[in-house]
Image (cartoon, helix red, strand yellow):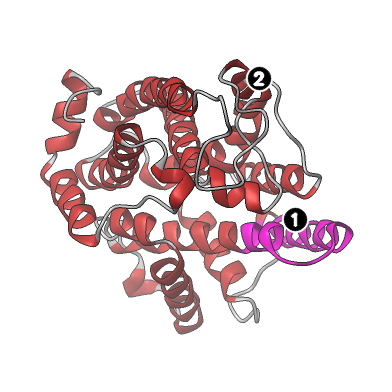
Amino acid sequence: MNGSAHTSGPVLAAYRYCETVTGHEARNFAYGIRLLPTAKRQAMSALYAFSRRVDDIGDGDLAPAEKAERLDATRQLLARVRNGEVREDDTDPVAVALADAARIFPLPLEGLDELIDGVLMDVRGETYETWDDLAVYCRCVAGAIGRLSLGVFGTVNGHDHVRAAEYADTLGLALQLTNILRDVREDAGNGRTYLPAQDLAKFGCAAGFHSDTAPPGSDFAGLVEFEVRRARSLFATGYRLLPMLDRRSGACVAAMAGIYRRLLERIAADPEAVLRGRVSLPGHQKAYVAVRGLAGLDARRTARSPLEDT
């Protein structure tokens, strides 16, 4: 689908704004969506730009009450989009682009309400006792984005959309758990703890992560290995989505997931690296993953054995 030839100037400008935000703020995401045809790439950029706005409110320096007010205003804007009340001459380019994307694609916009709910959990400083508790948060901030993305991608060959949405949700959980492992030190510095308290206690890490070394007497490597195994299992299930998508959508998902999967394995190889700084992949490796995704190589490999090639 490519609706750009019939898209008005204001809407195209709104999409360009969203694509600029995406390219500047989300390198991993941008590597994936560049593989999509124009209309899908624009819609994914609109989803990202709205999501980024929500995240920026949660991560900003405002007082919790002010953050809650801004999130409520953003929810009201989302309601306007859902109700078809945003016109193309609206002054908010993100709203204009999202409204157009929702007109073209069957987007489950309630997923963005879930994202706002998840960010409100951050604003309230919620912590998580068990994995089941953390999974609720992960579904709000990442699984919902997976389900929204599936609204853009669609499914092919008669695949069950409901099952595909379950796989997209699970893949979102895998990506979010990888993010949580990568950011344990940064999150601790911001007063946040995401890993389940039950897991932290099991491996002697309940004191938290406030230096470039693990808590004295802890089994930090054991903790990371435990969470990596969980993330690998989530990736294995989530990768079942790939054969249900058309070639370019599958390539997009394979590229984004592949980057995070390789990041996970880099963390597994040197667990304490996440305490010394942010672990990332160099640009040439991300480009390599994108090329493999476009060629369908990662899709074929993960269909055979999602845990190979680590």
Check disc 1 and give the amino acid type: Arg
Q: Residue at the spot x=56%, y=20% of the render? A: 203
Q: Position of residue 178 (x, y in %)?
A: 44, 38
Mark 1 secondary-structure assignment? helix
Query: Which is the main secondary structure of the residues drawn in magenta?
Result: helix
Q: Which quadrant, please, contains the C terminus?
A: top left
Pick the quarter of the image with the N terminus: bottom left
Return the mark for residue 130.
2
Inspect the magenta stretch and tell me whether residue 79 lies in it: yes
Kindly give the residue lying farthest to the front in the view shown: 216
What residue appears at the point 45 percent right and 20 percent down from the top-left corner? Answer: 226
- At label 1, counting other C-alpha atoms closer than 10 Å, the crowd grade (few under 14, some 14-19, many 20 or more) is some
Q: Is residue 185 above or below residue 147?
A: below
Pick the residue in front: 127 or 158.
Answer: 127
Front residue of 120/164: it is 120
Please indicate whether residue 53 sits to the left or right of residue 26 in the image.
right
Per the image, is 225 magenta?
Answer: no
Q: Is residue 19 above or below residue 255?
A: below
Residue found 52% across the figure and 40% down from its top? 180
Circle 1 residue: 75
Three-letter amino acid code of the residue under disc 2: Thr
Q: Nearer the viewer, mark 2 or mark 1?
A: 2
Q: Earlier in the sequence, mark 2 or mark 1?
A: 1
Q: Which residues are magenta?
A: 53-81
Q: Secondary structure at mark 2?
A: loop
Rendered location of residue 88, percent (x, y): 58, 76
Tag on residue 109? Answer: none
Per the model, the C-alpha gap separating discs 2 and 1 is 29 Å
Q: Are marks 2 and 1 in contact (CB under 8 Å)?
A: no
